[in-house]
Structure formats: structure tokens, C-alpha cells
Amino acid sequence: MQKRRLHNELNNWDDVRFFLAVLESGSFSGAGERLRVDQTTVGRRLAEMEKRLGAKLFDRHGKGMRPTPAARGMSEQAGRMAAAAATIERRLSGIDGEMAGIVRIAVTEGLASGWLTPQLLDFQLAHPGILLEVISGDQPLDLGTREADVAIRLVRPEAPQIVVQRMGVMRFALYAAPAYESLFGLPQSIDELFQHRLIDHTGYHAASSLGPWRDIASRHEHVVYRTNSSYAYQRAISAGLGIGMHPTYTPKIFPDLLAVPIELDMQTEIWLISHEETNQGVRTRAVIEHIRELFRRDQAEWFT
């Protein structure tokens, strides 16, 4: 009887968004990040939903939230509502002819700050009604539910209805700061590299083509700093903490860095990703074409 009543009451899509965000992320903070609201708002909305339904949906478990039987019983219906809402939004976005609104771009942190963002002024002057929301990081986002409209990734996704275009190649080399060289010198071979201080970026571990770096970092006995942040990684290298691997275009952004004379022969492909039901919307199409033109223009100097 309670299950039937819960299903009958589960008719507010805005409530369902908050419910699913907590269910899938396992915490108020994770749900807040996904919905771009603070966790206090998530907690308040969930409490209001529980009061209206007359059922407790989550129990605290450590630092997270564990779904109750009532929540698990609602999850299938909520999932169907989410899928239906996403389908409607994608189709509306695909036929939207307005050159005004938000376009979300998911891109790795390094490309976002070092390459893409400094080249968006011309686009914004040409399309003043479009708000570009750049989501930096390596976390996978669902283009089907419009967590992002366009993505630039170093790993090719395998998902239905995804349109993938190869934009170029990102090559890698080892770099150090002048401060590091003055203190420790620079290695001249892989064997010597294992005697030096190393800085590791865990974001590089996901790409199979960068496996040799992952192997070096896992076997190295002098890893002094490890992070998943490209900004923190670059700061650590520039501060002289150790030697790190960077794309070969990095000296264009940080000209003081010194190339370490060791050939790594490591590279990964760059992919521009969109969804077939949304990439024909005029806003999204304009962003895609601008990014493609940037890659075409910079390919010889940055991405070959």
C-alpha cells in the first residue's frame, strides 16, 4: 500500500532530480555538486519531499547517505522519469533555433585554462547571447542528460548516440623548473630519472596510451607529490618540487620550464564529443564549429 502511494505521489520532476542526485552520488555534497546548489538546499528539499510522501528516504551512513527500502522502491519510477525528461530536453535542444542560452563544455583542466579559455573572446563577441559554462576536470559527464553539451576528452567514449570527432594528437615530454635544475640537475636517461624527484598527475593514469607514465610513477621510489589537479600539478613543477610530464605545448604557456632530455614517445588522441540529439541546436552547433576551427588552426603548432 505504501509503495503504491509513493508511486502516486512521485509526480514532481524537480523533486525527482534532487532524489536521484542523492541516490546516485550517495551524499548531499555530491548531489549539490551535480545540481550546482549547496548541500543545505539539497537537505532541505529532501526533507520537504520526505514530509510530503510520509516516508523516510535516506539514512545517514558515515559521511554519506544510504537509501531506505522506500527509496529503493521509488528508484525505478524515478529513473524512468529522468530518462523521459532527458529525451524531451535533448529533442527540444536539437530543434532550438535561439542563439541565446547556456552551452556547457566539459574539458580537461589543462586544455580549459591553457588553450581553450584564452581563445573564446571572438566567439563571445560574435554570439553575446550565449553563456559558455566550462566544466573542467576529467570526470565523465552524461551528454544524454545534458550534464554537458560538448566535451573534449583524451579517451574516446563508447556510448550510444554519441558523435565523436578526432581533433588531433597530444604529445608528452618531461619538464622541470630552473629551480629544480639548480638544486638537482637534470637526468639524461630513464635510469637516471629513477634517481630524481618525480611529480605524478593521476589524471594521466586513465588513458591507456599513457600507460608507460603510469608504470614509471608506480615503480618510482621518489614520487614526492601526487595530485589529480592540473593546476596544482603545474604549480608543483614550477615551484621546483620535482620533474613531471606535460603536453609538449606547455612551454607556450609556461616559457620558463626546461625540457628534460629524455624521449618518452607518449601521446594520446584528442576527441570532440557531442550527442546526436542536441548537436544540431544552433547554439551547440556554433560552439562545436568554433572549437573545430580552433583545433584546425592550432593543429600544426599544438596538436601534432
Image (spheres, rainbow, N blue to C red):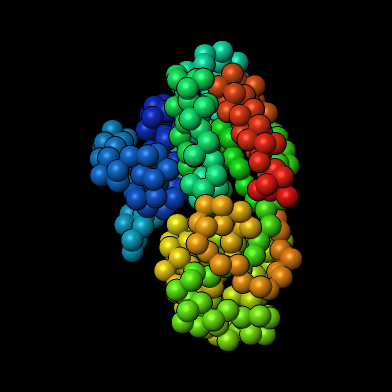
* Whether residue 53 is visible: yes
In the image shown, does 260 or 74 lie closer to the viewer?
260
Q: Is residue 99 left or right of residue 205?
A: left
- Position in image of residue 46 (x %, y %): 31, 40
Which residue shows up at 50% across the image and 56% down it? 254
- Position in image of residue 40 (x %, y %): 25, 44
In the image shown, does 246 or 283 lie closer to the viewer?
246
94 relative to 185, above or below: above
Q: Quadrant of residue 292?
A: top right
In the image shown, does 198 or 255 lie closer to the viewer?
255
In the image shown, does 177 or 67 lie closer to the viewer?
177
Which residue shows up at 57% across the image and 56% down it? 250
- Position in image of residue 133 (x %, y %): 45, 34
Q: Is residue 257 left or right of residue 67?
A: right
288 relative to 169, above or below: above
In the picture, the quarter occupied by the N terminus is: top left
- Position in image of residue 266 (x %, y %): 71, 63
Q: Is residue 237 left or right of residue 173?
A: left
248 relative to 73, above or below: below
Which residue shows up at 36% across the image and 57% down it? 64
**Residue lying farthest to the top in this orientation:** 97
Q: Quadrant of residue 203?
A: bottom right
* Whether residue 159 is visible: no
- The mark total stands at 0
Which residue shows up at 48% across the image and 25% down it? 124
